[in-house]
Amino acid sequence: MKKNFWVIYGIIGLVSLGFILYVSIINLPGKNIYWEKTNEASSSGLKGVIDFFKETFSSKEMNVLVIGKPGISNDQTYHGSELADAIMLVHFDPDKKKVFLISIPRDLWIDDDGQQYKINEIVHKKRIEAGLSKIEEITGIKPMGYVIVDLKTLESLVDDMGGVDVTLNEPAVDWVSGYTLGVGAHHLNGEDAIWLVRNRYNPSGDFFREHNQYSILQNLFNKFKSLDRDKKLSLIKKYVIDGNLLETADVSYVDLASYLFGGDFENIKLESIVLDFSTKLLKTSSLPLVSQATTTYVSVLVPSSGFENYQQIKEYIKKIIDKP
């Protein structure tokens, strides 16, 4: 019996050491959670090691705000590089094995401590922290932090993954060049994928590109799941670890690794929540903007129940997320 005990203890010790070496090899940075937890484990013996693994690989809900922006342009007349082209709250429910992508309309008119502007200006105005509070107010879900993704990075990712397949239910047209993607299936390279996620020349406007953003992310996600472990690790290292993608989000790399390389990852599904006009939760409004010489009008979105009244939106989101 005593011999068996030491065999079991030795196996657990080797597994623990292997895990620590694995973390060291791929050079995971960040919150030092590895060393804090392993130090606690080593100081409290076998129970500490077991508790460490139990806590490390436990299922945790994650809520991260993702802001996609076009980045710096060579066109000196273009001043929209700091305006968000995509604002998406990513909510992961480990019990349902679902990732909900909640699109926040970029034209939503908000009040920020007496200052009013479109929510897509939170990066430009350096009001991201205030924006996180506003996202919680709108959705009822508290973000754990945020990540800002330059769309050039997404373009590179699509190319590194060999392109992405999408199916359009209606054509996407560039009104300037006339470039068109027709109805049906398309295999897109990075440049075309970015063009599609930014295209809003459609009767449904921004909602058109929100649906297309989800379609591209859905297909990239499915493609990522089909990759072998080495390719997954290579992409994670390049775009998440080396790029410090999560430095502004309270999400540890240990948590991510436990999902990405765990057995349940293949069963995780994406679901989109787009607050388009079919939901009847939002309406357009035209607001005057007074300058020194003239008054111009800006088209914005506000809740149908009234400016800054997000109760119906929160109930709508909760109903979808809570659905069995």
Image (cartoon, rainbow, N blue to C red):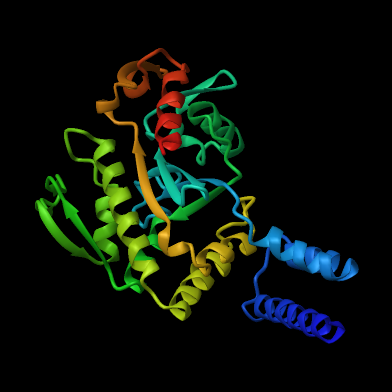
Q: In which quadrant of the rendered image does the N terminus lie?
A: bottom right
**Image coordinates for residue 239, horizontal then vertical, percent:** 49, 67
User: Is residue 156 at all visible to an observer of this figure?
Assistant: no
Direction top: furthest residue = 306
The residue under the point 19% across, 40% down is 201
Question: Which quadrant of the rendered structure holds the C terminus?
Answer: top left
Side of 31 relative to 60 (left or right): right
What is the x, y in percent for residue 6? 83, 83
Q: Of residues 126 and 200, which is closer to you in this image?
A: 200
User: As displayed, is residue 233 above or below residue 132?
Assistant: below
Number of numbered discs present? 0
- Where, by quadrant of the figure, is residue 283 drawn? top left
Residue 228, percent from left and from top: 41, 78
Q: Tell which residue pokes out farthest to the right in this image.
A: 43
Q: Is residue 27 visible?
A: yes
Residue at position x 42%, y 30% in the image: 319
Q: Quadrant of residue 291?
A: top left
Judge by depth and name the residue closer to the eye, 79 or 48.
Answer: 48
Depicted 308 relative to depicted 34: above or below: above
Q: Is residue 126 left or right of residue 193?
A: right
Taking the spot 36% from the left edge, 73% from the top edge, the residue there is: 160
Report x, y in % for residue 251.
62, 54
In the displayed structure, 85 sits above or below 180; it is above
